[in-house]
Image: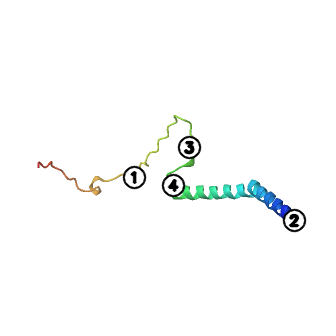
């Protein structure tokens, strides 16, 4: 009789744990993983997934970033070699 009561309490405790406490810990773990992912990948924006289908968003560079062509490097003219 004692054995059945112990098994019943373990079973009920496991059910209560899996229905109430475990989902809380899983939700917390997933939320922390999402935050870590978005911190490591700032280009990925979670708001992009919320946009409607067909909506276009154009991100342009700021106007104050002018590049000088002299700093880009040397131009190399390649010639085709016949073998």
Residue bearing the label numbered 2: 2
Counting every numbered tag in the picture gives 4
Cα–Cα gap, marks 3 and 2: 55 Å
N-terminal of the pair, mark 4 or mark 2, is: 2
What residue is drawn where x is 46% and y is 44%? 59
Residue under the point 31% across and 53% down: 68
Q: Secondary structure at mark 2?
A: helix
Which one is nearer the viewer's eye here, 15 or 19? 15
For marks 4 and 1, give the CA distance: 21 Å
Marks 4, 2: nearer the viewer: 2
Q: Earlier in the sequence, mark 1 or mark 3?
A: 3
Residue 8 shown left or right of residue 78 in the figure: right
Which of disc 3 and disc 4 is earlier in sequence? 4
Left or right: where does residue 5 sit relative to residue 55?
Answer: right
Which residue lies most toward the front here?
A: 1
Image: 4 above or below 55: below
Question: At numbered mark 1, what does the secondary structure look like: helix, strand or loop?
Answer: loop
Q: Earlier in the sequence, mark 1 or mark 2?
A: 2
For label 4, the residue is 42
The crowd level at tag 3 (other Cα within 10 Å; few <14, some 14-19, many 20+) is few
Q: Measure the C-alpha gap from mark 1 to mark 2.
A: 78 Å
Residue at the bottom extreme of this rendering: 2
Please name whichever residue, 28 or 22, is drawn nearer the observer in this view of the structure: 22
Which residue corresponds to the image point at 87% horizontal and 65% vertical from the top-left?
A: 2
Between discs 3 and 2, the one toward the N terminus = 2
Q: Which mark is residue 73?
A: none
Residue position for label 1: 65
Residue at numbered disc 3? 49
Q: Earlier in the sequence, mark 4 or mark 1?
A: 4
In the rendering, at what x and y percent does residue 12 appear? 81, 57
- Mark 4 to mark 3: distance in Å? 15 Å
On the image, the x and y values in percent for residue 54 come to 51, 34
């Amino acid at each position: 009789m004692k054995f059945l009561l112990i098994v019943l309490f373990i079973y009920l405790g496991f059910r209560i744990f899996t229905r109430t406490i475990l989902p809380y810990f899983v939700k917390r773990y997933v939320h922390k993983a999402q935050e870590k992912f978005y911190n490591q990948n700032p280009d990925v924006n979670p708001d992009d997934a919320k946009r409607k289908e067909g909506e276009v968003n154009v991100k342009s560079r700021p106007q104050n970033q002018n590049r000088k062509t002299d700093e880009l490097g040397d131009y190399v003219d390649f010639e085709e070699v016949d073998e």
